[in-house]
Image (cartoon, rainbow, N blue to C red):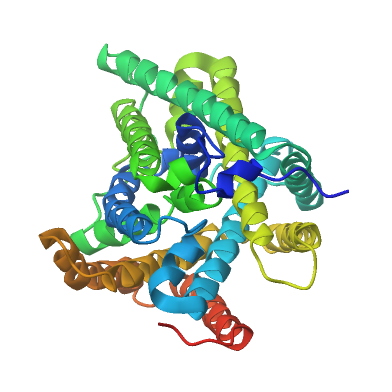
């Protein structure tokens, strides 16, 4: 039995009085997709700055093509069918990789961790149990997306993301307040301030963790007709990430770190196991919300594909591939999230190119044409320069390049018309 459509049948009717998603649902969906950046610290602020021109470009494309039903169709309005196909493949690929990363984090919450006698040794984990929980998270999220109406899935993702982020925000303020009153633990995480190139390289890596807010352009009119849902979601996540980073620094556990990774340690120190558990549950909530939002986007995109197989079959195949990939990356102790972020960065570059095909009507449009290519190139190159092009730094870039090339080849061979 095919599942209920992700939006009302009226959502595609130009004369329809209401779109498929309410404004708060679209905003919540974008918030859920970007929520995993809530502990990326200062990098999230950089990511917010990088995404601002992308949101601007999407708004202009929407005005240029008001009947487009997805990011791919917005791109196709100026770059043709091949451009649309390329954008759609990049979007699905990026969503899959980041969703698998979300499933990894969720699975890790349920796996017992065995500390070693050496505090500097990695924690021992049962990788097969970890894989089982990660696959279970993917299956549960996929079933919810398949079985529930799109509005319900969007609402569920929005509520989970908001509650989880509010928990982190509350404890970040509480930790900062405790630290400012003089209750500071001895700092055990100490790093010398990195040089300028190291700061820039680290921030650009963290900036890529802000992703997926363009999911609201998929099968929803109100959410994609203006930039408020995406802009508000980016702003909220950036604010929470900044406060979390500040709290970790104030607690004495930050150690000049540029992200908020030590936030959980600070909460455990001040509020014990109960506080640490609550924060962990909150993190699991907004990470599962991200998984839901990304799978929602994948399902919506597959419904718009011109494929011989049914959309449900395509979606089921993608879910199976995600489960297999989750097991593989966990066994290999590898996380594909940065690769997924680079793939979506390529999508955003395509969006900016599509925007540049519209006749420039402002100084901002002209500025983006010249500045953004250099900015996007810097996001990729700065981490490589800082790592001196080591294999560990090159690996995700090379994998992303292969995936982008495969997407371009598939779009080129799978469409019969040339770009406009």
Q: Nearer the viewer, residue 302 or 419?
A: 419
Q: Position of residue 144 (x, y in %)?
A: 74, 39
Where, by quadrant of the figure, is residue 184 drawn? top left
Q: Total of numbered circles in the picture?
A: 0
Q: Nearer the viewer, residue 396 or 65?
A: 65
Q: Residue furthest right?
A: 1
Q: Is residue 122 visible?
A: no
Q: Residue at x 58, y 28 (%)?
A: 160
Q: Residue at x 40, y 82 (%)?
A: 420
Q: Is residue 348 visible?
A: yes
Left-right relation of 376 to 313: left
Left-right relation of 317 to 334: right
Where, by quadrant of the figure, is residue 75 drawn? bottom left
Q: Position of residue 290 (x, y in %)?
A: 57, 42
Q: Residue 255, relative to residue 198: is it above or below?
A: above
Q: Position of residue 64 (x, y in %)?
A: 34, 61
Q: Residue furthest left?
A: 363
Q: Residue furthest front?
A: 15
Q: Position of residue 130 (x, y in %)?
A: 75, 47
Q: Residue at x 53, y 52 (%)?
A: 218
Q: Residue at x 27, y 11 (%)?
A: 181
Left-right relation of 74 to 195: right
Q: Nearer the viewer, residue 161 or 174?
A: 161
Q: Residue 397, relative to residue 98: is it above or below?
A: below
Q: Residue furthest top?
A: 181
């Amino acid at each position: 039995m095919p599942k209920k459509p992700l939006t009302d049948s009226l959502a595609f009717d130009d004369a329809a009085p209401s779109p498929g998603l309410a404004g708060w649902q679209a905003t919540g969906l974008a918030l859920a997709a970007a929520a995993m950046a809530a502990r990326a610290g200062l990098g999230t602020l950089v990511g917010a700055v990088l995404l601002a021109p992308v949101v601007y470009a999407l708004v202009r494309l929407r005005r240029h093509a008001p009947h487009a039903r997805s990011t791919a169709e917005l791109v196709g309005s100026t770059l043709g069918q091949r451009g649309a196909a390329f954008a759609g493949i990049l979007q699905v690929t990026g969503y899959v990789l980041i969703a698998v990363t979300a499933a990894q984090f969720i699975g890790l919450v349920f796996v017992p961790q065995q500390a070693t006698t050496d505090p500097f040794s990695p924690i021992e984990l049962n990788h097969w149990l970890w894989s089982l929980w990660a696959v279970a998270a993917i299956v549960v999220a996929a079933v919810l997306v398949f079985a529930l109406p799109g509005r319900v899935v969007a609402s569920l993702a929005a509520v989970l993301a908001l509650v989880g982020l509010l928990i982190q925000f509350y404890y970040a303020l509480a930790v900062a307040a405790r630290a400012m009153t003089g209750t500071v633990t001895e700092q055990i995480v100490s790093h010398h301030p990195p040089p300028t190139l190291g700061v820039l390289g680290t921030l650009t890596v963290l900036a890529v963790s802000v992703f997926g807010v363009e999911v609201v352009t998929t099968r929803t009119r109100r959410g994609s007709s203006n930039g408020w849902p995406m802009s508000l979601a980016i702003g909220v996540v950036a604010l929470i990430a900044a406060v979390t980073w500040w709290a970790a620094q104030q607690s004495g556990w930050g150690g000049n770190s540029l992200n908020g990774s030590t936030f959980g340690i600070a909460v455990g120190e001040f509020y014990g196991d109960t506080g640490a558990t609550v924060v962990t549950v909150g993190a699991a909530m907004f990470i599962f919300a991200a998984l839901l939002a990304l799978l929602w986007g994948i399902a919506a995109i597959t419904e718009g594909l011109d494929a011989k197989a049914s959309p449900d079959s395509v979606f089921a195949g993608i879910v199976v591939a995600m489960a297999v990939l989750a097991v593989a990356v966990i066994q290999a102790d590898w996380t594909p999230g940065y690769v997924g972020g680079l793939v979506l960065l390529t999508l955003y570059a395509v969006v900016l190119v599509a925007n540049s095909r519209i006749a420039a009507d402002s100084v901002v449009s002209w500025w983006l044409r010249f500045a953004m290519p250099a900015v996007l190139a810097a996001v990729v190159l700065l981490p490589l320069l800082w790592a001196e092009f080591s294999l560990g730094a090159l690996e995700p870039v090379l994998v992303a390049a292969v995936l982008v090339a495969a997407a371009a080849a598939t779009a080129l061979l799978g469409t019969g018309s040339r770009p406009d």
